Amino acid sequence: MRLLLTGLFLVTFFPLVLGQESQSSRATMYFTMGRTGTNLREFNQMLENKGLSPMRKGYTNFNFGYQARYNDFILGVELFHNPGPKSLFNGYEIDYRTTRFNVNVGFSFTEEGPFQLIHYMSVGSGFLNFQMLRENEFRDLDDFLQSPAQGFILRDGNIHKNSLNLSGFLTEIGFQLSYDLPIPGRDEALALMAKFGYSFSPFENSWNVNGISFNSTQSGAFLRLGAGITLPDYKYFYKDASLGVHIFYGLNFTSPDFFNEHLVDNGLQPFTGRPNNWGLKVLGYSKQLMYGMDFFNLGLGGKASETQSHSLNSVRVYANGGLKLLDLRNLEIGALAGIGFGNLRYTLTSDIKPDFPRLFEEPDHDGYLAAYGAMLKPEAFITYGIPLSQKKFMDLILGIHAGYELPASQYKLADLAMFKYMANPYLQFSVGIRP
C-alpha cells in the first residue's frame, strides 16, 4: 500500500516541482522481454553436496510499463513476471518465479525527439514462489483435499492472498534506448526499446526462506528488448490524444460457494468475503478511439486447518478497446470491450515444514490445482479530470468503472467447474494521472 501511495505521490507532484518555461511531454505504454543472469548459490551448493547437478543460471523477464516524460524528467511504473528455469530431480520439478512492482525515476540525456536515451533508477517490492513438485493430475477434488502433498511450495510475500501482500525492498539501475517509428494512419508512434542494467535486493537477508537465501531470484544484470505505443510531444495534438496510468481498487461480486462446500466436507475452513483487489490500468485515446491494458489479481487466503493454510487466486490481464461517448469539459463517459487471459490456482500448504536440507530430502507437504483460459468483458466508465497546473500540463483523473467478466472456459479445478466464480460483475474506483 505504501508503495502504491508513494508512486501516486511522485506521479502527481514531481512534474509540478520540476516544471520549466519550455514544457514538453511524452507518454509511453510498452512491453519488454529479456533475460537476467543470476545463480542460486546456496541452493546449488546444497545440490552439489548431494552429488546433483545445479539449477541452470538466469531467469526470464516479462515486463509491462508506463512512462511519462516531463521535459527531461522521467517517471513511470512497471510490473514484472519473472519465471525461472525448470530442473528435474528424482521425479520432482523444481522452478521458481517472482513478481515485482516498481516505481521508476529517471533523466533523459536527449532532447524531445524520435531517439531517447534515458538513465533511470527503480524502487519497488516483490513476491517469490519457489517450489519442488511431482507431476500429479488429480481428477477428483475431494481426493486432492484429502491428500494434497505433491512436494513443497515456499513463498515470501504472498500475492495469492492479497494484491498488496508483497515483501522486501527491491531496486534497479539501468539505461533505456528507444526509437520512434511512425504508424501509418495514426498520430501515435511505435517505440522500439532496449533496456539494460542491474536489479538487486539491497538487504542481504530479506529473501531467506527455510534456511536458504533466495536473494539471487531478485537480482542480476539484465537485457530486455520490446516495443510500445508512445505519444511524443513533437506529434502532440492536445485534447485529441492522451495516455494515462491509473491505480484502482476493484469490488468483485463473487464468492466460491460451491468450492467452499467441498472444503467443509473435507474438514477444512471455507473462504470468507469477496476477492476485492488492487490493480493497474493504462487507458489512452486518440480521436475518440480508446485502448489500454488492465492488470489485477483476485486473492483469497487464510487458515485451512490448525496445521494448514490455503489460498484461491486468479490473475487477470486484459487488452481493452472502445469509444469515448461523451467529452464535456473535464467529464468523460465511454465504453470498452476487453479480451484477455485469466488463471485460477488453489494452493493448500502445510504450516509445519523443516528447513533445508531436510526439506529437500522430505519434500511432500504441499499441493495445488490450477486452471487457465480466456476472459471477456464489457465495461462502461465515467472519469473526471482535475487540472494540476494553470497550463493544464497534466490532469489528475478520478474514475468509476463498471463491467462484467465472462470466462471462455469452465476453469475446472480437478472435476469442479469454477465458471460461476470466474463470471462476475465488478465495480472499480480509480485515481491516476494523464498528460
Image (cartoon, rainbow, N blue to C red):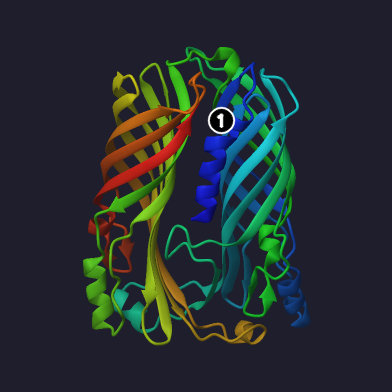
| Rendered position, 199 above or below 205 | above
**The disc labelled 1 sits on which kind of residue?**
Gly
Residue 252 x/y as whole percent? 28, 53
Q: In this view, does 281 lie to the left or right of 332?
A: right
| Residue at mark 1 | 228
Q: In this view, does 355 lie to the left or right of 159?
A: right
Q: Which of 181 and 363 is in front in this view?
A: 181
In the image, what residue occupies the spot 29% across and 61% down?
A: 274
Residue 162 position, x and y percent, is 42, 62
Q: What element carries label 1?
A: strand
Name which quarter of the figure residue 15 lies in: top right
One can see residue 98 in this view:
no
How far across and how far down the image is residue 73, in percent?
66, 31
Q: In this view, does 430 lie above or below 243?
A: below
Local crowd at mark 1 within 10 Å, few (<14), some, or many (≥20)? some
- Give the answer, above or below, for where 362 lies relative to 137: below
Task: State the residue at coordinates (38%, 41%).
Answer: 430
Q: Which residue is drawn at 49% across and 20% down?
A: 390
The residue at 57%/76% (across/down) is 91
Q: Work out whether residue 4 or residue 223 is closer to the camera in this orientation and state it.
A: 4
Q: Tell me if residue 223 can be seen.
A: yes
Quarter occupied by residue 97: bottom right
Q: In this view, does 380 lie above or below 144?
A: above
In the image, residue 227 lies at what x, y percent? 59, 31
